Amino acid sequence: MKTKNTKNIFKKMFKPLMVFTLLLSVVSCVEQSDKSKKSTGETTDTSEVVESEIDLTGKKIGYCTPSLNAPYYQALLQSIKANTEKNGMVFLSADGQDDINKQVAAVEDLITKGVDALLLNPKDPDALVGVTKLAKAAGIPVFIIDSSIDPSADYVTTVQSNNLANGELAGEWLAKKFGKKKMNIALLSGNAGNPVGKTRKQGLLQGITEEQLRTLGYIDLNIKTQMYTEWSYAGGLKAMEDILVAHPDINVVITESDVCVLGAIKAIAQAGKTDDILIVAGADGQKEAIKYIMDTDFYGCTAMNSPVQIGKNAVEYAIQYMNGKRDFKKTSFTAPLLITKDNAADYYDPKALF
């Protein structure tokens, strides 16, 4: 028969073992996705046929991604491809390979191939302006996908999640969670100057401060440091290792994207701080993050940035343009949505690319 002390010992031994078992499982999934080992056959077909008055057979949709080094980019490409082909059109893709010059050249190649619509996810908001003007001169409508571009560019609409509203939801949740308790915050960002990252960050900070003013009557926003991760697992790991050395009193990590923090979790676990640090993401709803939210207490929430829905909407808007529609809003948002432990199971799909 086990004594009370024996039971306590088992609890202390089991808890870290459980955390590290989950970490190994999820990290394995992330690394496998990062290396593009996921089979596209694992994804559920959510493509749809769009009503069209013209015959779409043979119409060409070109899509240029900034890279394919993250599950999000892979899932977005697959969604655009599936919806393009579902509607009888030809899908042409180009990879910017995380290099501005290569992305510019890739877009120019799609223009040369005579696509009927160009879907562009720009790595840089300024460097791709010129190719949008080339596309317009060639009579090709441009749709900006996921990220943003300088307003001087020639494009029909930007299709993305509501990054400001999503960030606000996550920041509000965090402020409610902590109440009057002191937050020592580390901010993990994507890369410097990225307009989407800046908007997500703005949303997070607005959500925190507005909720504090509403409930406490004052603002207590203590951001100890910001580190850039280049939107990568490895970048998040390195950034978090440095943060924990320089700022051991950190008890909150806020981030512009799940991918920025998934690697950071490994550093947090190795430092034995999964019980001391709460993670809040302003976006993406990546499946590994949702799994953490379901199974642990250290990943508090994330917000939905669905590559499946963005890809579907982008192809639909391109078809509408081909059918004569011109009155598009300059930015077309998907609906904001916060994912917490209360609803995480509703959005978790272990077979999803992202």
Image (cartoon, rainbow, N blue to C red):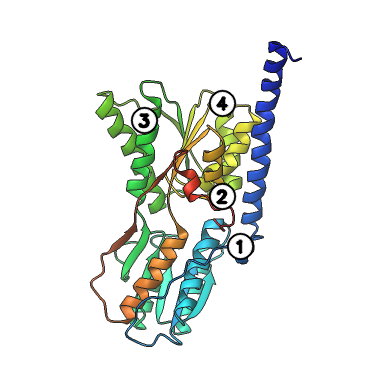
Q: Mark 1 = which residue?
A: 42
Q: In front here: 244 or 131?
A: 244
Give the residue displayed 50% in from the left and 72% down from the top.
82
- Bin the neighbour count of mark 3 within 10 Å (Cα to Cα): few under 14, some 14-19, many 20 and up: many
At label 4, the amino acid type is Asp
User: What type is the residue that disc 3 sits on?
Assistant: Ala
What residue does disc 4 label?
Answer: 275
Q: Secondary structure at mark 4?
A: loop
Q: Position of residue 221 (x, y in %)?
A: 36, 28
Dot label at residue 175: 3
Q: As drawn, is 176 to the left or to the right of 250?
A: left
Front position among marks 2 and 1: 1
Mark 4 or 3, nearer chain start = 3
Q: Earlier in the sequence, mark 2 or mark 4?
A: 2
At a point 48% along the width and 44% down the height, the residue shown is 344
- For the residue labelled by badge 2, is the local secondary structure a helix, a strand or a loop? loop
Q: Nearer the viewer, mark 2 or mark 4?
A: 4
Residue type beneath disc 2: Ser
Graded by Cα atoms within 10 Å as few (under 14), some (14 to 19) or many (20 or more), the crowding at tag 4 reads: few
- How far apart marks 2 and 1 lie (CA) works out to 23 Å
Taking the spot 36% from the left edge, 24% from the top edge, the residue there is 179
As helix, strand or loop, the secondary structure at mark 3 comes to: helix
Which circle's residue, 3 or 1, is located before the other in the chain?
Answer: 1
Residue 262 in sight = yes
Task: Tell me the CA gap for discs 2 and 4.
Answer: 24 Å
**Viewer-nearest of discs 3 and 1:** 1
Amino acid tagged 1? Glu
